[in-house]
């Protein structure tokens, strides 16, 4: 089915471990984004990408790494997870007109 | 960067129009205004966007003031399913054809039976 999918949907990990959240879209949208949402807060932009091999930092990039070798995939890696990175992570893609299409979210708990 | 200001919460009676305001006084001439909503813990959903003119689609209407410093999202006949957090966002160009959409805390709309 066409759309945007995130995996895993739920993840529990320990402090210091590396975690990768996957994001895959089937629309061939140029733009992709990663946001995090903490309880009681709005969404904060972590990283975004205008095209394959082009990525830029958002508001809160520290502690995260992204790559975009293929248009359809935009993985987000926490190189050494910390408790403060416990959050819900949303991936989104959009066309040039700016309509974002979000995934269902990945809920990450760092113990 | 253009930023937006929204009331933290609003109530609306079921069947009535919901009018959600947004201030974006520092918006630049080529920056669009977007509205999204987030129902419970789902991913946000696109509603509508505009530059200067008023816009309408099957979900809502967007009224932008002539000076573009504020806008109002109108849900013409609110239903219980419209209970959500509504985000007003200004799309900011980051250069080299790239742009950001920065979400604030939004307005929590409660539709009351």
Image: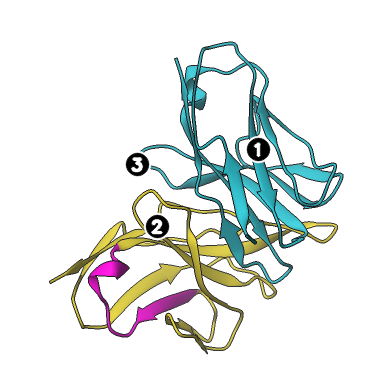
Chain colours: A cyan, B yellow
Tell if the residue under mark 3 belongs to the same chain as the one under mark 2. no
- Report the side of A110 relative to B20 (left or right): right
Residue drawn at x 35%, y 41% as measured from the top left: A40
Residue A40, label in figure: 3
How far apart are the two marked residues, 1 and 2, measured between alpha carbons?
Answer: 27 Å
Tell if the residue under mark 1 belongs to the same chain as the one under mark 2. no
Structural crowding at the residue carrying mark 1, measured as other residues with C-alpha within 10 Å and reported as few (<14), some (14–19) or many (≥20): some
The kind of secondary structure element at disc 3 is loop
When the figure is inspected, residue B32 is found, relative to residue A19, above or below; the finding is below
How far apart are the two marked residues, 3 and 1, measured between alpha carbons?
Answer: 25 Å
Q: Is residue B73 found inside the magenta-colored segment of the image? A: yes
Q: Which residues are magenta?
A: B70-83
- Report the side of A68 relative to A105 (left or right): right
Q: Which residue is mark 1?
A: A22
Q: Which residue is mark 2?
A: B106
Badge 2: chain ID: B
Residue drawn at x 35%, y 72% as measured from the top left: B20
Residue B24 visible? The answer is no
Is B12 in front, or is A110? A110
- Quadrant for the C terminus of chain B in the image: bottom left
The kind of secondary structure element at disc 2 is loop
Structural crowding at the residue carrying mark 2, measured as other residues with C-alpha within 10 Å and reported as few (<14), some (14–19) or many (≥20): many
Query: Where on the picture, by quarter, is residue B92?
Result: bottom right
Residue B98 horizontal/vertical position (percent): 78, 57
Q: How many numbered markers are drawn? A: 3
The kind of secondary structure element at disc 1 is strand
When the figure is inspected, residue A58 is found, relative to residue B67, above or below; the finding is above
């Amino acid at each position: 089915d066409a759309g945007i999918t995130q995996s895993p949907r739920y993840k529990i990990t320990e402090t210091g471990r590396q975690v990768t959240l996957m994001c895959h879209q089937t629309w061939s949208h140029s733009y992709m984004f990663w946001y995090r949402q903490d309880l009681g807060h709005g969404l904060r932009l972590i990283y975004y990408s205008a095209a394959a091999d082009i990525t830029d930092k958002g508001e809160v990039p520290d502690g995260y790494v992204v790559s975009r070798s293929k248009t359809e995939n935009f993985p987000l890696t926490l190189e050494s997870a910390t408790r403060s990175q416990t959050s819900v992570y949303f991936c989104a893609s959009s066309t040039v007109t700016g309509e974002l299409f979000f995934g269902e979210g990945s809920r990450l708990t760092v113990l | 960067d253009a930023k937006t200001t929204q009331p933290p919460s609003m109530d609306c009676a079921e069947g009535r129009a919901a009018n959600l305001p947004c201030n974006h006084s520092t918006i630049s001439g080529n920056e669009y205004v977007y509205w999204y909503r987030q129902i419970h813990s789902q991913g946000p959903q696109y509603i509508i966007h505009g530059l200067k003119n008023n816009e309408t689609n099957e979900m809502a209407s967007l009224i932008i003031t002539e000076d573009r410093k504020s806008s109002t999202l109108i849900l013409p006949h609110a239903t219980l399913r419209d209970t959500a957090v509504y985000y007003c966002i200004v799309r900011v160009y980051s250069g080299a054809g790239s742009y950001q959409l920065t979400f604030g805390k939004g307005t929590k709309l409660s539709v009351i039976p």
